[in-house]
Image: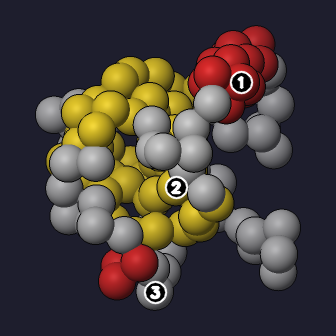
Amino acid sequence: MADFDGSAGSPFVNQILHDRYQIQALLGRKPGRQTLLALDLKNQLPVVIKLLLFSPDFTWEDLKLFEREAETLKALDHPAIPQYLDFFEVEIEFGKSSALVQSYIEAHSLQQ
């Protein structure tokens, strides 16, 4: 798994979500969303978890778009596109959150 210097950027690091995914690092952050690198404890493979946080700036449109992203990812099958793995709700200290889990593809970020 690649080394990331995002451990200080998220309160989720080292937490286990859904009794399966151990958070390793923060990959990205936008208002109301976080993208995390995690280890799937069942198969020891890296995964990416996108969290939609039900924060004060949350809108129902955000949830609809997030769910649409998950459904679109489910329908795609290409080696250059992350594979849909899981979708669940999780209760975190900040409130409820929806989580989309996808396969991890080691590559440069779009910013890079």
Name the residue type under label 2.
Gln
> CA gap, disc 3 to disc 1?
32 Å
At 45% from the left edge and 44% from the top edge, which residue is drawn? Answer: 55
Tell which tag, 3 or 1, sits nearer the viewer: 1
Q: Is residue 5 above or below residue 109?
A: below
Residue 75 sits in which quadrant? Answer: top right
- Marks 1 and 2 close (CB-CB < 8 Å): no
Q: Position of residue 45 (x, y in %)?
A: 38, 48
Task: Name the image quarter holding the C terminus.
Answer: bottom right
Say which mark, if any, is on residue 61. Answer: 1
Measure the C-alpha gap from mark 1 to mark 2: 17 Å
Mark 3 highlights which residue? 5
> Is label 2 in a helix, a strand or a loop?
strand
Q: How is the image coloured?
A: secondary structure
Q: Name the residue rendered at 64%, 60% in the picture.
A: 30
Indicate which label's residue lies in the foreground, 2 or 3: 2
Above or below, 8 relative to 106: below
Q: Is residue 83 above or below residue 56?
A: above
In the drawing, does residue 90 fall left or right of residue 6? left
Earlier residue among tags 2 and 3: 3
Looking at the image, which is closer to me, 65 or 38?
65
* Label 2 crowd bin: few (<14), some (14–19), many (20+), radius 10 Å: some
Quarter the N terminus occupies: bottom left
The one of 17 and 3 positioned closer to us in this rendering: 17
Residue linked to disc 2: 34
Which amino acid does the dot numbered 3 rest on? Asp
Measure the alpha-carbon separation of dots 2 and 3: 15 Å
Residue 101 seen in this snapshot? no
Q: Nearer the viewer, residue 15 or 64?
A: 64
Q: Position of residue 90 (x, y in %)?
A: 29, 30
Counting residues from the start of the chain, the first of labels 3 and 1 encountered is 3
